Image: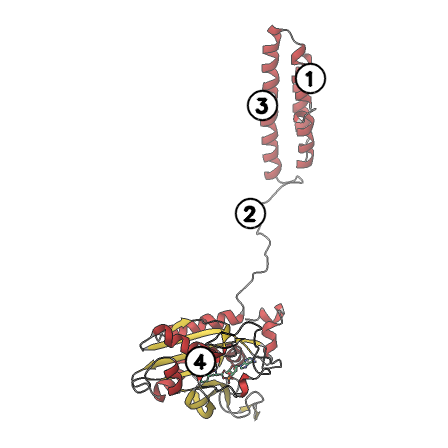
Amino acid sequence: MEDIESISASIHDDITKVKNLKELSTLETLYLGRNGKINELLKKMKDKGPEERKTYGQSVNLIKENFIKLLISKKQALLTTANNDDYIDVTLPGNKYPKGSLHLISVAVEEISRIFEKISFIRVSYPEVEYEFFSFESLNMPKTHAARDDFETSFIQAPQHLQYGKMLLTPHTSSGQVREMWRVGTPPIRMINIAKTYRPNWDATHTPMFFQFEGLCIDTDINITHLKGTLDYFVKAYFGNDIEARLRPHHFQFTEPSFEVDVTCTVCKGTALVDKQRCRVCKSGWLELGGTGMVHPNVLISGKIDPNIYSGWAFGFGIERVIMMKYGIDDIRNYYSGDIRFLEQF
Ligand code: FA5
């Protein structure tokens, strides 16, 4: 019993002297460890007579319980009382960690989707790894067309499809036009197809992988005024109310007539002048956005739609290009450089 009393007394002394959590943990091992003081007491049980063993055991257990209670309250005190090594002031503001954000391309994809959803266009995506048929044949592009050359399109080494030909990385979102016509069947069709597209180019305005968004509208009595109205709506919604679209005659195999779309330069606001000098970005007051036109009757036929009943228009623009125009970015490669200093600005 003498041991019990001395250990019981030393517990109080030892706990009072503890100054931090490390010391507290050492004390815990000293008493509760496998060879700790309390276990040593328990080991002596077997030497006691039957009568004494019961009261001895109870006393040791009491000491153990007390020790644990003291340990817990000491720990609490160390964590919540100022002027000791382990004090934590829970009212202090936490450390700020840098926050990530969506990539500016993802933001633009969402923005463009919302703008077209408001006028009932349905967002779709079609395969990035596509067959020749959907990228070229169905779009009225003959086998001899220059865009079908190995230098213009990335072909995949895969077995040819008997009907749809070779596999390739789609060079434009126009490959979704006939797929959408097949999916919907009978018009009306209002599609906005946003996808990754691929061409083997690499310079300040071209990357091998880039995003395009393609609009397609087919119904009875659709004409160029609907196309112009939709483009005006888009450029004002995306770039701002002072921006206008204009159509310039051009040629695409899959549209007739075909146009290139220009928009008012966002830098000089269409004046072609910045500080009385010629605008270096556009030189003319206009910037080129992408291609458009009335869907060629042969494409409607590929899509199993009667060109005598239905007509439509389509456009295809580069997403990187529209963002460049909106923010005055001069090198497209910045998007994919992974340079956080560039990305953080948006
Ligand atoms: C086309 O791709 C046509 N499919 C567009 C179209 C659709 C016309 C429907 C008529 C009807 P074009 O090759 O001009 O057209 O490309 C359109 C836009 O994609 C370009 O204006 C440019 O913004 C972007 N683009 C083209 N190649 C690259 C590239 N390598 N890197 C980044 N953007 C590109």
Q: Earlier in the sequence, mark 1 or mark 3?
A: 1
Labelled disc at residue 91: 2
The secondary structure type at the circle numbered 4 is loop
Q: Earlier in the sequence, mark 3 or mark 4?
A: 3
Q: Is 315 on the left-hand or right-hand side of 11?
A: left
Q: Earlier in the sequence, mark 1 or mark 4?
A: 1
Labelled disc at residue 6: 1
Q: Residues within 10 Å of mark 2 (few under 14, many from 20)?
A: few
Q: What type is the residue that disc 2 sits on? A: Thr
Q: CA distance from mark 1 to mark 3?
A: 16 Å
Q: CA distance from mark 3 to mark 4?
A: 74 Å
From the image, tell me which residue sits under label 4: 240
Estimate the x, y position of residue 320 in percent, counting from the top left: 53, 77
Q: Earlier in the sequence, mark 3 or mark 2?
A: 3
Q: Are marks 2 and 4 in contact (CB under 8 Å)?
A: no
Q: Can the viewer see residue 9?
A: no
Query: For this rendering, which residue is in front, 82 or 105?
Result: 105
Q: Can the viewer see residue 54?
A: yes
Q: Residues within 10 Å of mark 3 (few under 14, many from 20)?
A: few
The secondary structure type at the circle numbered 2 is loop
Estimate the x, y position of residue 72 in percent, counting from the top left: 59, 31
Quadrant of image for the C terminus: bottom right
Q: Residues within 10 Å of mark 1 (few under 14, many from 20)?
A: few
The secondary structure type at the circle numbered 1 is helix
Discs 1/4, front: 4
Residue that sits furthest to the front in the current view: 162
Q: What type is the residue that disc 1 sits on? A: Ser
Q: Residues within 10 Å of mark 4 (few under 14, many from 20)?
A: few
